[in-house]
Amino acid sequence: MAGKAISRREVLRLGAGLSAGAALAACSPAPDSVTSELIHGATGGGLKDTVDPHFPVTMPDIARVRSLFEPLLRFTPDYRIEPCLAESVEHNADATRWTFHLREGVTFHDGRPLTATDVKASLERMGDPKNPTALLSDVAPLIDFPASRAVDPHTYQLVLKQPYGIMDQLLAAYTMGIVPQDFDLAHPIGTGPFRYESLVPGQRSRFLRHDGYWDRKAGVDSLVVIDFTDDAAKVSALLAGQVHTIDNLPAYLAGAIERQGAHTLVSETGGWVPFTMRVDAKPFSDNRVRQAMRLIVDRQQLIDQALSGFGRLGNDLYGPFDPDYLGSALPQRQQDIAQARHLLKAAGHEGLQVELVTSTAVGTGGVESANLLVQQAAKAGVQVRVTKADASTFYGERYLSWVFAQDFWSTRLYLPQAIACALKTSAYNETHFDHPRFTELITAARRTTDPGRRRTLVQDAQRIEHEEGGLIIWAFANQVDGYSHQVSGLQPAREQPVSAYRFNTITLKGS
């Protein structure tokens, strides 16, 4: 199938996740008379697709919100914090008062200038204690919104009830997009390089270039993001010229698409596709079982086969680009079937049988590593039954309830990641981890402004998670994406796929 011309009829057959109309639209000229349109094939998506800047879940969600909205700070391709909508930020001695100086000349998609009042409204939406965005779940109760204020049109001061020394790390995340004070999700307006035109959940979305953009203006007139819940359809669409870029190219196809005239973009990232074990549910409520499962995994085999070699060993800790990362300093976990059997016997779980829920929605290496784990676990007498959930529903109502499952995470520093997934208050605590001492350490670490003390606290927290947590982080995947010969301007980025979804850097040959 790869490499041959694909008819419209075949597009309808291969276009899993696309309705017939959407599939035809994907390979037909846009209804408007435009000079150039970039079409991106995104992995996953479904009927709960959103353009909410503060609550994206799936890959298509992330691609959309990164095109429409921007945070006060952002990460560079090598994952360093740099100014974005805020030219500079400062805090007082105990980090209870953070002051942001906004960039002048920034306009929203409707032409209105960005002001400190918009920042105030955005942070109040993101930090709503009843429904905070994931990375603010920890700090939201600490924000003194009545005392926080717009000092002048280009200066906003955030006041906290307790010290919080990592506010800049949180506010650089892509989920911290600034919106106008009268933001309406039905008509989403941001400051990003593209402005909203339409969204059909589970199918496609379309955006137009924001000509008033303050940074590098998009090299195309419009952007289309298409949901793909099937890898074969996604790759076929790229090779047939129906999309220009795709994220999460199955790694084993990297060489094949090069031979068919397309190209690969490989980025060393801190992204990971973990196995998640709920620590509050049997059998994983027994730490001996969790440790046994970690010793069952042959990590290098998973990298070699599930990722086709595009990855680095993981040691059950996230945040590899964090300066305080401990994972590489700890003894690397290796497969140890004898010890795994010993732990399972001690826990009374010889002949353990478990269900593992996975989906193509978790991206490259997910389903493949799940299938390999079945074989590896059998060596220890553990029967793993894989259930493959539909990509359009995996992140639905049952997400976070699976006892044993998989997920995907993009690159983050350690503390923001822990706040997002490892505390009782975390929005995405897949393992239901709730460890009092760990929580104390994370709380103390995010309060301090002393880098040396923070390092000690963070590394103590990592030791607890390494020994008692519910995550099997077997690798950090190198991000492998695909793009057509028409595309130029992409560069590797540690944060997320396709140059961290900065589509404004792309130009199309002949446009």
Image (tube, rainbow, N blue to C red):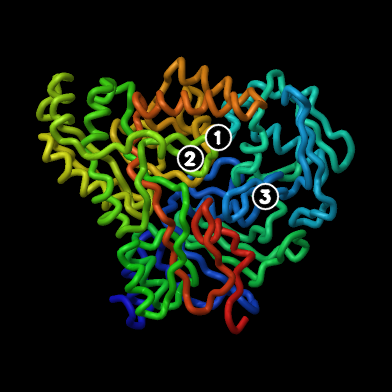
Q: Which mark is residue 70?
A: 3
Badge nearest the viewer, 2 or 3: 2
State the residue at coordinates (80%, 23%): 147
State the residue at coordinates (39%, 63%): 249
Does residue 502 appear to the left or right of 243 in the view shown?
right
Q: Quadrant of residue 454?
A: top right
Q: Quadrant of residue 380?
A: top left
Q: Position of residue 21 (x, y in %)?
A: 44, 68
According to the picture, the residue beneath numbered tag 2 turns out to be 319
Frontmost residue, 55 versus 441: 441
State whether residue 25 appears in this view.
no
Judge whether 151 appears above or below 488 on screen. above
Q: Position of residue 227 (x, y in %)?
A: 45, 59
Q: Mark 2 or mark 3: which comes first in sequence?
A: 3
Q: Quadrant of residue 3?
A: bottom left
Judge whether 180 appears above or below 466 on screen. below
State the residue at coordinates (58%, 77%): 508
Badge nearest the viewer, 1 or 3: 1
Badge nearest the viewer, 2 or 1: 2
**Amino acid type, label 3:** Glu
Question: Could you classify mark 2 by the number of other residues whose Cα lies within 10 Å: few (under 14), some (14-19), or many (20 or more)?
Answer: many
**Amino acid type, label 1:** Pro
Which type of secondary structure does the marked residue at label 2 adopt? loop
According to the picture, the residue beneath numbered tag 1 turns out to be 416
State the residue at coordinates (64%, 65%): 504
Q: Mark 1 or mark 3: which comes first in sequence?
A: 3
Question: Could you classify mark 1 by the number of other residues whose Cα lies within 10 Å: few (under 14), some (14-19), or many (20 or more)?
Answer: many
Which type of secondary structure does the marked residue at label 3 adopt? loop
